[in-house]
Amino acid sequence: MRIFILVDMEGISGICRSTQVTPGTADYAAARTFLTRDVNACVQGCFEGGATEVVVRDAHWAGFNLLWDDLDPRARYVQGRSLRERIPGIADCSGLILLGYHAMAGTAAAILEHTMSSAQWQNLWMNGKKAGEVALDAGMAGDRGVPTIMVSGDDKLCREARALLPGVVAVQVKEGLDVEGGILLTADEAHRRIRNGAARAVRKCRAIKPHKVRKPVTLRLELVSRGVVPVARENIKVIDGRTFEVKARTVEEALNMLL
Ligand SMILES: [Zn+2]
């Protein structure tokens, strides 16, 4: 049983400030340790739950955030770019875990909420419904028949995931008070929850259904700035000066049209 873990940074335990997820800052250097330790707890839990193979993809920023020499040696690690394929090899996996994720753009009192880019993306809708990164990644895995079995992050991220993915194991590692503020657990308690959650998710992964998105997929993107909406053409519809829609056969194809 192969499990794929996509790792973002904003929802990692111990992180509640944007400098912690921004390469080049002093806060970031320390936060990489928090990230690596959440990943190791998750990998450990996956194996305890019955996984025989675990693949981890570093999906924050350019994908070079994990501390390579501190990683659990039993997993394989994908870093950097991957030919526009966001979850390489997902079709051969039994389950997807979204570790260290954050709530969608605009969520109140959610730590470091955004959808893909806080500087450029104001709001995203998938088939008419507001969507964040959980919906995008779960939809991408669902297109390949793979269920999203666990998420970790703050309470708002957990609420968003539970509403979208029945049966998902939602591991809350902190409580959001503001975009840059929250109530944190101790490291030991956060790691215990992640490890137990991952084991539970892997054990029940056959009981969780893949998240199926209606086809064709329409993604509507409202941008932060004026003057950058693309010109209308086949499968691209301009809604207004900051908003446009793309239509595609899969979630990944639609997302790639926005990037
Ligand atoms: Zn991120």
Image (spheres, rainbow, N blue to C red):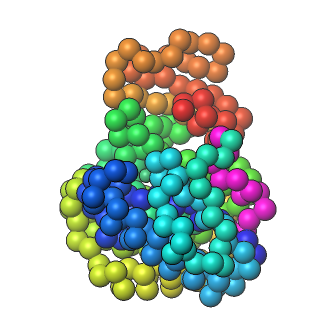
- In the rendered structure, the answer to whether residue 180 lies left or right of residue 14 reads left
Q: Position of residue 256 (x, y in %)?
A: 61, 34
Placement of the C terminus among the 4 image quadrants = top right
* Residue 238 magenta-highlighted: no
Residue 225: image quadrant is top left
Q: Position of residue 191 (x, y in %)?
A: 42, 81
Residue 45 visible in the displayed image: yes
Residue 79: image quadrant is bottom right
Q: Which residue lies at the image location 31% right of the left edge and 70% below the top edge?
A: 14
Placement of the N terminus among the 4 image quadrants = bottom right
Which is nearer the eye, 82 or 183? 82
Which is nearer the eye, 160 or 152? 152
Which residues, given as a range, are shown in magenta? 84-95
Q: How many marks?
A: 0
- Please, is residue 196 above or below residue 252 in the view? below
Q: Position of residue 5 (x, y in %)?
A: 59, 65
